Amino acid sequence: MSKTKIWKQLAFLLIPALLIVFAVSPASNPIKSEAQSILSGILGKKKVAQNPNMVPAWERFKVKVDGITELDMSGAEIYQVPGKLPYIVMDGHTWIPVAGEPIEVSVLHDGACSQNCQAGIGALRANITPAIIQKDVDINSAEGKALASKFDIESIPQFIFGNGLATFKSQDGSLFIDNLPEGLVTEKDGLYWLQNSGVGLKADKFIKPPQFADLDSEPTKGTGPVQVVEFTDYQCPFCKRLFDNNRELVERLVAENKITYVLKDFPLNFHQDAVNYTHAVASCTKKVGDNDAYWKMHAAIFDNMDTWSGKGDAGKQFLVDYAKNDLGLDIEACLADPSTNAEVQADVAEGAKYGVSGTPALFIGTQIMPGAIDAATFEKAVNEEAGK
């Protein structure tokens, strides 16, 4: 199931229960634009008269601000959209009714909710309920360490549901939690940890170096203490830029025994030459030859990108000829073996598991460095990891 379909399924499962009023912040709330759109559709923002039948109806609910404090509605302006529940404008905020009890979510980060963290909260509010009570938890605090240990968490930010999720209802009246895709959340002691990769939420950094599979069989340089794993697309111009920016630095860090550099495949589906043959050529160079042969092909692929990229079969033949004439390797049989492409796709699946969606993606120890970073940024990250 795709991540988009999972989000749609989450949203579809909701059913009105108890009304909770949620504040739309003028500056930062993810549903601000939706509320503005609704309100802008009210001709002249017609104010509903202080109908004695309306206000008491609202007061029958225990209305909460972010689930914490009761809302004094004495100064509220109430607006009515035909066919919808009323909206309240008060204290510079728009208050809108949403379905269901509020849900508590502990958000694990390293002291500040980053852009990825805020995007995650926005996605939860947009796809589950706006009535999310966000509790920020520093991963270095006692509570943060306990949660990380409980769920064996490797990266941040992370989202752990508490009160409210277990009692949410789906449209057929069953528990919302029972309708989630298998494996999307892990429950322990009444807490529910959301698997970020299942819904496409990205990590900022790792608490400990990620445990990538099959590192011993991947192309590798060096045996230093800092693990550097790159997911690359050989037809990606930014991957070539990363290679050009850092080729001398990588060789120096390997010579100084500071890093172990590992290369994994991540051909993007719109780079057809990369998908169809380039990564297979590189993989076969290592299979038929050895690790040294692979790195020579690796350099040749990037150095000659203008020669083979976009050329289809002619580009493939260029690389096959390079393997044969310059490296002394006949890789034709390996290229015809279906297992070769299967290994490439296994790398792609693993990258997606760790939040890779574009290339290059560089994992330096516990840090994620997306994009074609320069040598200074690369070395700084290595030195930071070496100092831990």
Image (cartoon, rainbow, N blue to C red):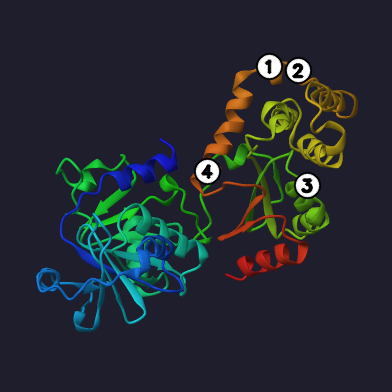
Mark 4 secondary-structure assignment: helix
Marks 2 and 1: CB-CB under 8 Å? yes
Q: Amino acid type of disc 3?
A: Lys
Q: Is residue 152 visible?
A: no
User: Residue beneath label 3, please?
Assistant: 240
Judge by depth and name the residue closer to the eye, 236 or 298.
Answer: 236
Marks 3 and 2: CB-CB under 8 Å? no
Q: Is residue 72 left or right of residue 161?
A: left
Marks 4 and 2: CB-CB under 8 Å? no
Q: Which mark is residue 291?
A: none
> Which of marks 2 and 3 precedes in the sequence?
3
Disc 3 to disc 2, C-alpha distance: 25 Å
Disc 4 to disc 3, C-alpha distance: 21 Å
Q: Residue 171 in the image: x percent, y percent?
A: 20, 43
- Please state which of the two labelled residues, at mark 4 or mark 2, is closer to the viewer: 4
Q: Amino acid type of disc 1?
A: Ala
Disc 1 to disc 4, C-alpha distance: 26 Å
Is residue 75 depicted above or below 222 in this figure?
below
Q: Amino acid type of disc 2?
A: Glu
Q: Which residue: 29% across, 44% down?
A: 12
Q: Is residue 111 left or right of residue 326?
A: left
> Which of marks 3 and 1 precedes in the sequence?
3
User: Residue beneath label 2, please?
Assistant: 332
Q: Amino acid type of disc 4?
A: Ala
User: Residue beneath label 1, please?
Assistant: 336
Q: Is residue 224 left or right of residue 88?
A: right
Q: Which mark is residue 352?
A: 4
Mark 2 secondary-structure assignment: helix
Location of the N terminus (image quadrant): top left
Q: Which residue: 24% across, 68% down?
A: 21
Mark 3 secondary-structure assignment: helix
